[in-house]
Amino acid sequence: MKTATKTARMRSSSGNVKKKTRVKTATKAERVQESSGNVFADLGLRNPQDMLAKAQLAHRICQVIAAEGLTQMKAAEIMDLDQPKISALMRGKLKGFSADRLFRCLNDLGQEVEITIRPVQQTGRRGGIHVAASGATL
């Protein structure tokens, strides 16, 4: 059950300040749905596997930038982008960033990108895109 507390300062007619606290308790039962592991699929967005892969690549770029202690300006210089693009990428604004472009950014930051293609494990199932980052380089 969710509760919210609100404290307000009120002046009495004599000018003294009084604190008044109100507690609200939610009466509706909250529905919780377990995630599929892909927030983009859970939200019903188009191409959720692609979106998740791009988000994971961008996250890895942010990890490398942080580990190297780079400023956005220095990262932009290394990746041949402007600083606002780096800012957008670091805030998860990935419109205009293809997976290929994110691969090149990782390469510019000294990261190897390895692509593995293999058959699906379950017959009749469509293949997917998965990003697995090795922690050994940081």
Image (cartoon, rainbow, N blue to C red):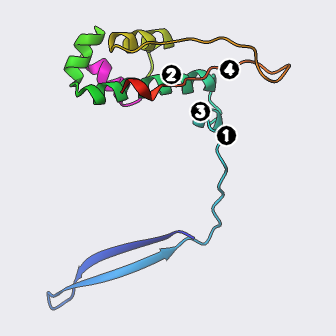
Q: In 3D space, how far apart are the residues under numbered discs 3 and 2 (Cα atoms)?
A: 11 Å
Residue lying at the far bottom in this picture: please name it.
14
Residue found 58% across the figure and 37% down from its top? 39
**Which stretch did the figure color magenta?**
83-93
User: What residue would you read off at disc 4?
Assistant: 128
User: What residue would you read off at disc 2?
Assistant: 54
Kind of residue sitting beneath label 2? Lys
Residue lying at the far right in this picture: please name it.
124
User: On residue 40, which mark appears?
Assistant: 3
Residue 10: within the magenta? no
Provide residue 26's location: percent of width, then percent of height: 56, 70
Residue found 59% across the figure and 32% down from its top? 40
Q: In 3D space, how far apart are the residues under numbered discs 1 and 3 (Cα atoms)?
A: 9 Å
Compared to residue 15, the image places residue 99 above or below, namely above
Element assignment for label 3: helix
Judge from the rendering whether residue 89 lies leftward or rightward of residue 25; answer left or right.
left
Do the CB atoms of the residues marked 2 and 4 lie less than 8 Å apart?
no
User: On residue 36, which mark appears?
Assistant: 1
Q: Nearer the viewer, residue 121 or 86?
A: 121
Kind of residue sitting beneath label 3? Phe
Looking at marks 3 and 2 on the same chain, the residue that comes earlier in the sequence is marked by 3
